[in-house]
């Protein structure tokens, strides 16, 4: 079966993995269930940060869209993953996010592959590079996937 839409996804995740509804006050979830609030605060935060990731960099390589997708391992709420996601978007690079939140099989797969858990982590099949550390990844993407103006 397919689940479409944020509201349905949140409801499904709460039902499937959330706490017993008899043991918590559902009103405590209003920040994620009240869609208008979530969208407004996300827009305000993006605006305050200059809307990173919303427009393509002028010096992005013209062939970036034809590249193999770069794997970005991380989890949604990590502040270290966000700048990498934004840089991938700004460069117009196809990418696949491999979610490895606590308890996921992907986290175990990362430890098996690299010997440790740390995000962000990228696998770039275009160059054969695998690397950790958000600032270094952003610098790498900037060096490899831009033209020199």
Image: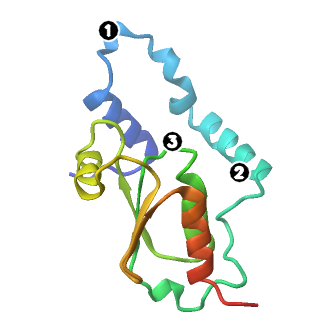
Examine the image and state in which quarter residue 138 appears.
Answer: bottom right
**Mark toward the start of the polypeptide (2 vs 3):** 2
Where is 144 relative to 130, above or below?
A: below
User: Which residue matches tag 3?
Assistant: 77
Query: Circle 2: is it few (<14), some (14-19), or many (20+) Cα within 10 Å?
Result: some
Where is 128 relative to 77, above or below?
A: below
Q: Hey, which residue is sitting farthest front in the picture?
A: 115
Camera-nearest residue between 110 and 48: 110
Q: Secondary structure at mark 2?
A: helix
Residue 40 horizontal side relative to residue 121, left or right: right
Q: Horizontal and vertical percent for residue 69?
A: 40, 75
Residue at image coords 76%, 90%: 149
Whether residue 89 is visible: no
Query: Circle 3: is it few (<14), some (14-19), or many (20+) Cα within 10 Å?
Result: few
Q: Nearer the viewer, mark 2 or mark 3?
A: 3
Camera-nearest residue between 64 and 113: 113
Q: Secondary structure at mark 3?
A: loop
Residue 34 horizontal side relative to residue 101, left or right: right
Q: CA gap, disc 1 to disc 3? A: 27 Å
Q: Horizontal and vertical percent for residue 72?
A: 42, 62
Q: Secondary structure at mark 1?
A: helix
User: Which residue matches tag 2?
Assistant: 46
Where is 121 relative to 10, above or below?
A: below
Camera-nearest residue between 84 and 19: 84
Q: Horizontal and vertical percent for residue 125?
A: 36, 79
Whether residue 114 is visible: yes
* Number of the label disc, if any, that sits on residue 22: 1
């Amino acid at each position: 079966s397919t689940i479409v839409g944020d509201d349905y996804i949140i409801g499904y995740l709460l039902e499937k993995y959330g706490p017993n509804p008899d043991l918590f006050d559902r009103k405590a979830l209003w920040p994620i269930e009240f869609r208008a609030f979530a969208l407004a605060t996300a827009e305000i935060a993006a605006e305050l940060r200059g809307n990173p990731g919303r427009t393509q960099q002028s010096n992005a390589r013209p062939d970036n869209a034809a590249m193999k997708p770069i794997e970005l391992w991380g989890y949604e709420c990590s502040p270290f993953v966000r700048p990498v996601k934004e840089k991938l978007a700004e460069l117009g690079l196809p990418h696949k996010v491999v979610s490895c939140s606590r308890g996921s099989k992907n986290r175990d797969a990362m430890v098996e592959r690299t010997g440790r858990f740390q995000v962000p982590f990228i696998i770039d099949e275009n160059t054969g590079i695998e690397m950790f550390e958000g600032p270094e990844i952003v610098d790498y993407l900037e060096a490899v996937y831009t033209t020199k103006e």
